[in-house]
Amino acid sequence: MKYCSKCKKLYNNDTLTHCADCSRRLISDPHYSSPVRLVTANGFEFERIRAAIDSAEIPYSYQEAKNDTGIQILNSAPPENCDIFVPLNAYRDAVDILIGIGALNDVPVELSEQDINKLKDDTKKAKEEELPEDKARLIRILSIIAFLIVLAGVAFATDALTGWIKSLIGM
């Protein structure tokens, strides 16, 4: 599997060295959370795909396609064409969903079993490295308290400094 970091496109052909769209050098081992362009859609089809991906709780993002005319700005309509991106580790599930709803026009890039196993291992390692929710909450609370202490310290120091300056001037 090869990946273009600019176009966010996957390639099956391991012999390719450059992207067919932008000529950028392809990456042979992308990060498991790298965004991958899933599909380009517009209007009702765009909303239908978003709803299906939402219901499967797959994270995604979208942006206006590069070849979009931008005419929707005049009437505040949604973009004509949007590229929808999913993380690489969710790509296979998202493709299955699009096939299920009949929204995939292009032949999807098939991930090899080796690629799938690597993505699963990387995702598992990342989840193991995450802090448990209660520890993360405690760290957030302590950070807020520390920030408030620093603000109070700055306020008291400023007050003391202005008092000292006033006493020098004799006010």
Image: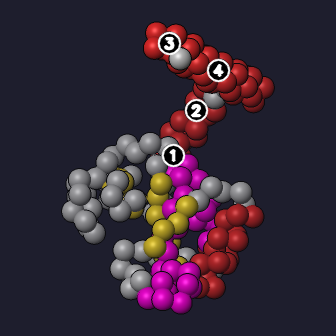
Q: Which-is-in-front pick, marks 3 and 2?
A: 3
Q: Which-is-in-front pick, marks 2 and 4?
A: 4
Q: Is residue 121 magenta?
A: no
Q: Nearer the viewer, residue 127 or 138?
A: 138
The amino acid marked with disc number 3 is: Gly
Q: Dot 2 corresponds to which residue?
A: 126
- The spot of residue 57 in percent (x, y) is 71, 57
Which type of secondary structure does the marked residue at label 2 adopt?
Answer: helix
- The spot of residue 46 in percent (x, y) is 59, 78
- Mark pair 4, 3: CA separation: 27 Å
- The spot of residue 166 in percent (x, y) is 51, 16
Question: Going 73% across and 25% down the picture, which residue do you hit?
Answer: 141
Q: Dot 4 corresponds to which residue?
A: 152
Q: Nearer the viewer, residue 113 or 48?
A: 48
Position of residue 67 in the picture relative to residue 167 (left or right): left
Position of residue 11 in the picture relative to residue 103 (left or right): left
- Mark pair 2, 4: CA separation: 37 Å
Rendered position, 159 above or below 127: above
Residue 33's disc number = 1
Question: Going 38% across and 85% down the picture, which residue do you hit?
Answer: 69
